[in-house]
Amino acid sequence: MTTELAAPLLPVYARYDVTFTDGRGSWLTAADGRRYLDLVAGIAVVGLGHCHPAPLAAARAQLERLWHVSNLYWTEPMAELAVRLSERLGGGQAFFCNSGAEAVEAAIKYARRKTGRSGVVALEGSFHGRTLGALSVTGQPAKREPFQPLVPGVAFARLNDPQSLRAAAGPDTAAILVEPVQGEGGVRPADKEFLAAARAVADELGALLVFDEVQTGVGRTGTFFCFEQTGVRPDAVTLAKGLANGLPLGALLVAEEAAGGFQPGDHATTFGGNPVACAAACAVVDAVDEELLAEVRAKEELVRQAFPAVRGRGLLLALDVDRPAAGVVTACLARGVLVCTAGERTVRLTPPLTIAAEELEQGLAVLAEVLR
Ligand code: PLP
């Protein structure tokens, strides 16, 4: 491994002692020349693999033409991406931003504006980001406590417990916010009955049902949106991570049924809809076709064969282990394979969707050897 870089950075990340300089497909190269098989993909970000030729060509061509104009004006890549995402959603409008947390912030503001209410029902164990608004709806006390007071009006219900959801919601609920599969919270899928109950409660109350698909979206779970597998259609969806294959881009998508919440001046961000990121994202959305999605589902099966106890959907998978997961991650890293954690004793696998079956098997063999 490389020697740790001494850099004047605020110490919010416990970084591993490795510095990456290059990436191609499912492989990363470190500063010392060592190659690593990447079963993390930037935590469900680099869905098409590192330096995939399609978003690379699109971003490069856009870089040669135009990097930025204000949102006072139109750009073609932003408009083209909005059309693509609206088609995938089955009708709706987009707001573009730069990250998952920002997409969640936009969703909260949108729901408040649309309903004239301020409450949010979120779930215990959820993760929606680190900005104050997104942290306020994140159901992990250890992350929230040091930063109190947070945004008021948030009630937490238990995942897959419709009773608890009904109890948490009320006449001031603007939004019910759900990850179809809790990612950071341990890769815990919401079951269909629970999501159907969330839909029913939102309809009864006139609240918006918002799915945070920042981690599950853009093909990660074997369909473009994870909600397509649930039989439940949300009013709004957040996307980020995989959307531009590693360039920063987030989106709030609002379905036609829930239109009309925002007026000019209600929300904005300088870099939102950046043409380079949007050009890359158009190429990503085009690449996440039925063929790739079928491959994702086939590779999920490969992982399930190797580790029958794995949970999750598509290539957002996790395995509970009988020891601290951090040690497993370090041992895999020492053997040239990147995996990550999703809790103290949970190892998470989020490889590129494009990973070759042989590469995946190679990585799984290393994980099995470490766990032996
Ligand atoms: N929402 C979900 C479901 C996430 O998994 C994450 C990040 O892991 C976020 C929001 C926050 O995204 P970002 O780190 O881009 O702000």
Image (cartoon, grey):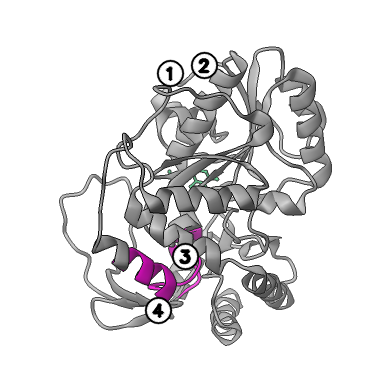
Question: What residue is disc 4 on?
Answer: 36
Asked whether the beta carbons under mark 3 and mark 1 sit within 8 Å of each other, the answer is no
Q: Give the percent coordinates (x, y) of residue 71.
A: 33, 37
Q: Please give the range of residues in magenta.
A: 38-60
Q: CA distance from mark 4 to mark 3?
A: 26 Å
Task: Identify the residue under disc 3.
Answer: 283
Front residue of 106 and 368: 106
| Mark sitting on residue 325 | none
Asked whether 58 falls inside the magenta stretch, the response is yes
Q: Confirm or deny contact between disc 1 and disc 2 (CB under 8 A).
A: yes
Q: Amino acid at mark 1?
A: Pro
Which residue is found at the position 77% from the left and 43% from the top?
A: 232
Q: Earlier in the sequence, mark 4 or mark 1?
A: 4
Q: Nearer the viewer, mark 3 or mark 1?
A: 3
Left or right of 67 in this view: 201: right
Q: Is residue 5 above or below residue 114?
A: below
Judge the density around disc 3: few (<14), some (14-19), many (≥20) Cα neighbours within 10 Å: many
Identify the secondary structure beneath mark 3: helix
Amino acid type for the residue under numbered disc 3: Ala
Mark 1 sits on what residue? 149
| Image depth: mark 3 or mark 2 in front | 3
